[in-house]
Image (cartoon, rainbow, N blue to C red):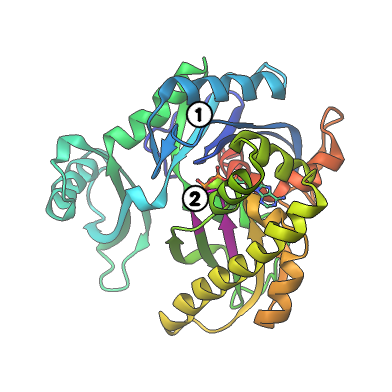
Amino acid sequence: MFGFLGKKTGSLVGVDIGSSSVKLVALSKNGKSFKLDAYAIVSFSPNAVVDGNIQDMTEVGSAIEKAVKVAGGKLSSAVTAVPASAVITKNIEMSNAFTEFELEDQIKVEADQFIPYPIDEVALDFEVIGTSKNSPNLNEVLLVACRKTDVDQREDAVSAAGLNSEIVDVDTFAVERAMSIIPADNDSELLTGIVDIGASTLTLNVVKGSEIIYTREQAFGGNDLTNLISQQYGMNVEEVEQSLRLGETAEEIQEGVVLPFRNTVAQQVSRALQFFYSSGGHGELVTLYLAGGVSGIDGLAGQLEEELGLNTQVANPFLSMNVGSKVNSARLVRDAPSLVKATGLALRGLEG
Ligand SMILES: Nc1ncnc2c1ncn2[C@@H]1O[C@H](COP(=O)(O)OP(=O)(O)OP(=O)(O)O)[C@@H](O)[C@H]1O
Ligand SMILES: [Mg+2]
């Protein structure tokens, strides 16, 4: 399995470091059923994480530390992720006569040819997918590479919070895993979309069966809404985010700013879908799930369903899970769509 680091011991917690907040999810497994033991969302200032780079390690580390406390404390190891945009993936073919050790060496040689950074600055991982269609003596290998600094940043942030960094995954893989437990059409030929609208980025992933077949990011998110409210109503950004997240925004702001913004969100989602359809050859989506903080805007799913003519639902990865007694279930319904990525990371921690 993937991960730039991957030695799993004990139970792991999923930590999604977004551009506005840290989301932490702790899951456990009993037989085949999952349980949400605890979760936490802790915001940080807009300059702490910019374009997927952790600029203020102390602030992000403290946010993770606080999230661990909110979640109940006894967590020791974490799974984090680098953004898909920081990662290069490539399918290559390799002789199946190589031992694991030889394969690693050979993969470094191959990787050096298409990665635009010096190989000693690159974190590499790979997975043997199976026998190549071209020859029974070749294996198809999926290679995943990113800059070491991107991995190091995540490790440092987690360490600063007093946790061990056990696995650094890729966020697309986390979404793929989370989608496997979000009830979707089981038909492996049908396409399901999931659009994550965070503070600064809108990401559309399309899943077919259990695999993501398409990913695209747009620079758009809730920061636009937050800044607008902050300017017009003289509130600071933290206050605005808090009130949006808790559903405590004044009626006047809802009608004057949030509702008009909902139209902008709908346009951006529609644009993301147009890019997907014009990429060709995939067919039509059957369902669209909404994730990320912005999907909490009242009536967004209904508006999209009507405008796009597409079954649209707010994603809740916990619908089929047991929920621990300490979790506030009313809050969870609000927070669930923001926790999709963190849940996918926590699921990684439960894999054998
Ligand atoms: N109920 C709501 N209505 C509208 N906007 C909301 C609501 N709840 C949260 N938001 C907005 O969602 C954004 C945060 O979403 P999220 O936590 O998914 O972002 P992030 O993961 O930190 O960012 P990114 O994924 O872009 O790096 C903020 O801009 C916040 O204002
Ligand atoms: Mg996010």
Q: Quadrant of the N terminus?
A: top left
Inspect this view and state whether residue 32 appears.
no
Task: Please state the horizontal and vertical placement of residue 110, each as a whole percent of the image.
Answer: 16, 52
Indicate the quadrant where residue 286 lies.
bottom right
Q: Quadrant of the C terminus?
A: top right
**Is residue 198 a member of the stretch shown in magenta?**
yes
State which region is magenta: 194-202
Secondary structure beneath label 1:
loop
Task: Please state the horizontal and vertical placement of residue 119, each as a whole percent of the image.
Answer: 15, 40
Residue matched to label 2? 200
Task: Please state the horizontal and vertical placement of residue 162, each as a whole percent of the image.
Answer: 52, 14
Residue at disc 2, CB closer than 8 Å to ligand 1: yes
Tally of numbered discs: 2
Horizontal side of residue 150 vs 214, given as left or right: left
Q: Residues within 10 Å of mark 1 (few under 14, many from 20)?
A: some
Q: Residue at x 68, y 16 (%)?
A: 73
Marks 1 and 2, how far apart in space?
32 Å
| Residue 265 drawn above or below residue 251 | below
| Residue 308 drawn above or below residue 41 | below
Name the one closer to the observer, 122 or 296. 296
The disc labelled 2 sits on which kind of residue? Ser
Name the one closer to the observer, 2 or 207. 207
Q: Residue at x 64, y 54 (%)?
A: 294
Residue matched to label 1? 8
The disc labelled 1 sits on which kind of residue? Lys
**Is residue 4 a member of the stretch shown in magenta?**
no
Q: In the rendered structure, which disc, 1 or 2, sits on the residue that comes first in sequence?
A: 1
Horizontal side of residue 340 vs 112, given as left or right: right
